[in-house]
Image: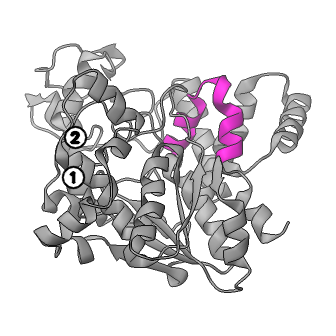
């Protein structure tokens, strides 16, 4: 395949192919922009869809400019939201961004990736600068955005700050002089705003590439940290395997395509071989998928260990060999134990898991959020955490 075909492959939309060909004809390394707000500390497979495409472009010799939206994260991206997002503090964004690049470098070559924080140029803007940026976009055009249009029609509040968000991330494209910007289909408005803003500031307009959205573990909504339907880069092989096995059969093909890059013929070939060897059961296809996903971040040995753990703990309902052990004094609050041993992310998460009947002690469900541990026991959270 030539460069254009490689770049187009697997994308949802490219605006526009003619402009892309023109930029490529200059025979130079193009500046590829990708921005991510550190609104949470973990990247997940939804991010991987775009990072995989960025890696392809990097391998073609182009320059990846990864923008950490440490400033814009404090405003919050309104894309797909039906209400104003709570603003993050500077401290929260700094803490969340600490692990970002370590995770990104599992996919991209750190030596060929330029990392910028948009606070470098945004935090020093004065009121005159903001007014100048805002004057280059209209309210009418802003209300063309689906989420804003719905909220406006439903008389739900939209803050002026939310109008600023797409303008500021668009201004990022002006500063880094992006030739191409990549994002999910839900980011199309922001990416097109970048093209518009570059034109306003007499900068060559960027090509917009949107990538399909990966369904979450529920198979319905997009993969999202806030929705809890995600597989994180930092998940253990055991967690990755178990979570993959939980996806609905209806999204298996999308996972093959968006995460592994398999086209229809390759998916058919893999399924045919698995069905021939193991029988016509989607479970065996998901087992293959789970192993391949783990190998993106770990190795084949880890993938097989994840599978072994799943069969032992989930399918045969046995206690894992590497169960976490700890000593406590009598009368310790169950939620405290769950939190301190990282079986849950927070005390509120621990209470929620108990209320959802997801916590057992020696095989018996616990429903009392004030339960205290008094004897030796085995605690299980969900299907896979002990």
Is 249 inside the magenta-drawn segment?
yes
- Position in image of residue 42 (x %, y %): 37, 53
**For residue 85, which numbered disc appears in the image?**
2
Q: Which residue is mark 1?
A: 75
* Quarter of the image that includes the C terminus: top left
Is 248 inside the magenta-drawn segment?
yes
Residue at 74%, 25% (x, y): give it.
Answer: 282
Q: Please provide the residue range marked out in magenta.
A: 238-258
Q: Is residue 278 visible?
A: yes
* Quarter of the image that includes the N terminus: bottom right
Quarter residue 8 falls in: bottom right
Marks 2 and 1, the one that precedes in the sequence: 1
Q: Using the image as rendered, state which of residue 367 and residue 46 is in the foreground.
A: 46
Q: Using the image as rendered, state which of residue 250 and residue 271 is in the foreground.
A: 250
8 lies left or right of 348: right
Q: Using the image as rendered, state which of residue 374 and residue 30 is in the foreground.
A: 30
Label 2, label 1: how far apart the Cα atoms are: 8 Å
Residue at 28%, 53% (x, y): give it.
Answer: 165
SS for callout 1: loop
Q: Is residue 166 above or below residue 66?
A: above
- Magenta stretch secondary structure, dominant: helix
Quarter residue 78 falls in: top left
Q: Is residue 86 above or below residue 129?
A: above
- Position in image of residue 274 (x %, y %): 84, 34
- Position in image of residue 164 (x %, y %): 25, 54
125 lies left or right of 383: left
57 lies left or right of 161: right
SS for callout 2: loop
Residue at 74%, 80% (x, y): give it.
Answer: 25
Residue at 29%, 28% (x, y): give it.
Answer: 151
State yes or no: discs 2 and 1 in contact (Cβ < 8 Å): yes
């Amino acid at each position: 395949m030539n460069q254009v075909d490689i770049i187009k492959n697997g994308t949802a939309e490219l605006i526009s192919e003619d402009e892309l060909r023109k930029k490529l004809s200059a025979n130079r390394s193009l500046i590829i922009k990708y921005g991510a707000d550190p609104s949470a500390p973990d990247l997940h497979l939804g991010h991987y869809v775009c990072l995989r495409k960025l890696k392809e472009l990097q391998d073609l010799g182009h320059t990846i400019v990864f923008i950490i939206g440490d400033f814009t994260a404090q405003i919050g991206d309104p894309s797909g939201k039906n209400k104003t997002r709570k603003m993050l503090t500077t401290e929260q964004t700094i803490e969340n961004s600490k692990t970002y690049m370590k995770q990104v470098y599992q996919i991209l070559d750190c030596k060929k990736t330029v990392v910028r924080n948009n606070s470098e140029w945004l935090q020093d803007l004065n009121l005159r600068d903001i007014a100048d940026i805002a004057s280059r976009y209209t309210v009418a055009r802003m209300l063309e955005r689906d989420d804003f249009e719905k909220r406006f029609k439903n008389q739900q509040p939209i803050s002026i700050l939310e109008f600023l968000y797409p303008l500021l991330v668009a201004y990022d494209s002006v500063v880094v002089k992006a030739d191409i910007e990549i994002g999910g289909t839900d980011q199309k408005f922001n990416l097109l705003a970048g093209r518009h803003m570059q034109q306003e500031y007499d900068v060559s307009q960027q090509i917009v590439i949107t990538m399909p959205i990966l369904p979450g573990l529920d198979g319905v909504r997009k993969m999202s940290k806030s929705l809890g339907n995600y597989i994180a880069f930092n998940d253990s092989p055991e967690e990755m395997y178990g979570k993959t096995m939980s996806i609905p059969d209806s999204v298996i093909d999308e996972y093959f395509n968006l995460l592994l890059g398999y086209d229809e013929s390759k998916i058919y070939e893999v399924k045919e071989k698995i069905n021939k060897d193991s029988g016509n059961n989607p479970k065996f296809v998901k087992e293959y998928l789970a192993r391949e996903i783990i190998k993106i971040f770990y190795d084949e040995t880890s993938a097989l260990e994840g599978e072994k753990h799943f069969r032992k703990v989930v399918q045969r309902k046995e206690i894992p060999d590497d169960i976490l052990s700890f000593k406590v004094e009598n009368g310790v609050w169950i939620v405290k134990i769950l939190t301190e041993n990282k079986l849950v992310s927070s005390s509120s998460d621990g209470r929620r898991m108990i209320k959802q009947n997801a916590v057992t002690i020696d095989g018996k469900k616990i429903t009392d959020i004030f339960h205290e541990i008094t004897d030796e026991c085995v605690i299980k959270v969900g299907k896979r955490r002990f």
